[in-house]
Image (cartoon, helix red, strand yellow):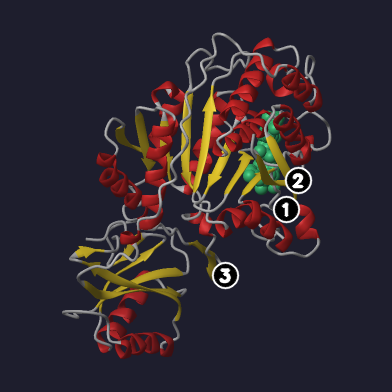
Amino acid sequence: MKTHSVTLIPGDGIGPEVTHAACRIIDASGARIVWETAHAGASVFLKGVASGVPKETMDSIGRTRLALKGPLETPVGFGEKSANVTLRKLFETFGNIRPIREFPGVRTPFSGRGIDLVVVRENVEDLYAGIEHMQTAGVAQCLKLISRKGCEKIVDLAFQVARSEGRSSIHCATKANIMKLTEGLLKRTFEERAPQFPGIRAQHIVVDNCAHQLVKKPEQFEVIVTTNMNGDILSDLTSALVGGLGFAPSANIGHEVAIFEAVHGSAPKYAGKDVANPTAMILSGVMLLRHLGEMEAAARIEAAVVVTLAEGKTVTRDVVGDARAAGTRAFTDAVIANLGRSLPEWRARPHKPLIIPAPAASSVPVTPKDRRTVGLDVFVESDKTPDVLGGLLTQLGSASGFTLKMISNRGTQVYPVRGASTDCVDHWRCRFLYGAPNGDLPLDKVHGLLGSLQSAGLRWMHLEKLQEFDGKVGFTKAQGED
Ligand code: NAP
């Protein structure tokens, strides 16, 4: 049997307990892993490393190309960036595979429905690019960036996951009905790529209905491919269908590196108490073994976990409540003792090696034959009323060669007025059109417009070109705009 080197990041909170459990079981399964321990997260932030991921850890993952990672704490709403997101982005692990399956012995309101699905979440783009700005003292912005290349990679990976697991259907869950350009790009890419995977039924579903259907009839889903934020939320929901976050493993897949971790966080209230359920981390280890081609060891561990849960004698508090609960260590001992056993009625899913699609060189860059800039959205801070601001901007715009098309506030057109009763703030998007027949806007015209706004005492903080690509409009209308 081959020996593999894997970086082990114990993580924060319950992380050291659950990663220790997973390593003990993997070592007992017969797989030969050399663990290279490295650190990230809270202890690293405390040492003043702003990314939460020190160079030694980056070097270790760069060497082994594989990591089993405990959860890492991220301060909520303040402080440094998430070390998790940093790791996913720096190693370009673009796909996050999150399977869940109903386990015998784990009673939930959905028991007996045969839930067995996998969420494939885009892992590096979307709002998680973390590009945020305070545009005024009272208005914050987060840029949602979605690329065609990113969509192609995640869609192809999701179809390959379906193939490797013998699945016959795949849903693409987006909010393309509202975010037609960003979420719509994933939908369009999915519909374009689907014919390349005959035999797998492909359908789109609006993400809010997907959440609804997951609770109403979860057994209808096999694979769900979705954007980063949607996938984060949907996969916590799907974990709850089978008993909670203690049962949800995941793999962060890239072309160079793969990082395996439980979906759950550091659950600080349970840290060091020997109560956390290590199943999610153990099953993340099973995914790691399958990735390494160690199918037999993976199947042995999965079968032992299933037997332990089905017997229900030694299981954690999230399964049986406090009165009858066993600790993390005792559950781990029970799984090790059950290695080699299996439950006759449990049918292991056949796993063929996952083919990670190579990025299509032809899709980069996406070059249009024709591109035209037809105007500008200028974001302006002002305490004027819409009418006063509209009158002033109409004059300033026409003196600079632009026509003021409309002003919106928090996404709704407020000038010219359309009878909306918008509760305005001091942050206005002002849409100026320029009658350029071809090509880009002349820079002196842009300078002229911005200069005139500034001279009139208006503070501008953000500019967005209004572009058309091959005759297709590359921007959306405000609510209420003609
Ligand atoms: P969390 O740590 O996942 O915990 C939420 C709840 O899930 C817990 O209170 C517990 O529910 C249950 N739970 C999670 N793991 C469990 C396990 N192994 N066994 C049994 N129950 C488990 O989420 P959070 O409290 O929102 O986040 C805590 C910290 O973790 C934050 O700093 C967050 O940023 C970080 N985080 C990290 C990752 C990651 O590293 N990938 C992911 C998510 C969050 P009950 O209260 O019902 O018992």
Query: Residues at badges 3 and 1 in contact (C-beta under 8 Å)?
Result: no
Is residue 202 left or right of 425 when viewed as pictured? Answer: left
Image coordinates of residue 16 in percent, x first then y, are 78, 40
Furthest toward the left, the residue is: 437
**Distance Cα–Cα, label 2 vs label 3:** 34 Å
Q: Earlier in the sequence, mark 2 or mark 3?
A: 2
> Going 45% across and 28% down the picture, which residue do you hit?
214
Query: Residues at badges 2 and 1 in contact (C-beta under 8 Å)?
Result: yes
Looking at the picture, which amino acid does disc 3 mark? Ala
Q: Residue 421: in sight, yes or no?
A: no
Is residue 248 left or right of 478 when viewed as pictured? Answer: right
> Ligand 1 near label 1 (Cβ, under 8 Å)?
yes
Looking at the picture, which amino acid does disc 2 mark? Asp
Image coordinates of residue 178 in percent, x first then y, are 34, 49
> Going 63% across and 22% down the picture, which residue do you hit?
300
Q: Earlier in the sequence, mark 2 or mark 1?
A: 2
Circle number at residue 137: 3
Relative to 302, say whether 287 is above or below.
below
Image coordinates of residue 253 in percent, x first then y, are 52, 46
Q: Secondary structure at mark 2?
A: loop
> Going 20% across and 71% down the picture, which residue do you hit?
370
Q: Quadrant of ligand 1?
A: top right
Relative to 277, say whether 404 is above or below.
below
Q: Secondary structure at mark 1?
A: loop
Residue, disc 2: 12
Circle number at residue 41: 1
Q: Crowdedness of circle 3 by 10 Å Cα count: few (<14), some, many (20+)? A: few
Looking at the picture, which amino acid does disc 1 mark? Gly
Relative to 132, say whether 218 is above or below.
above
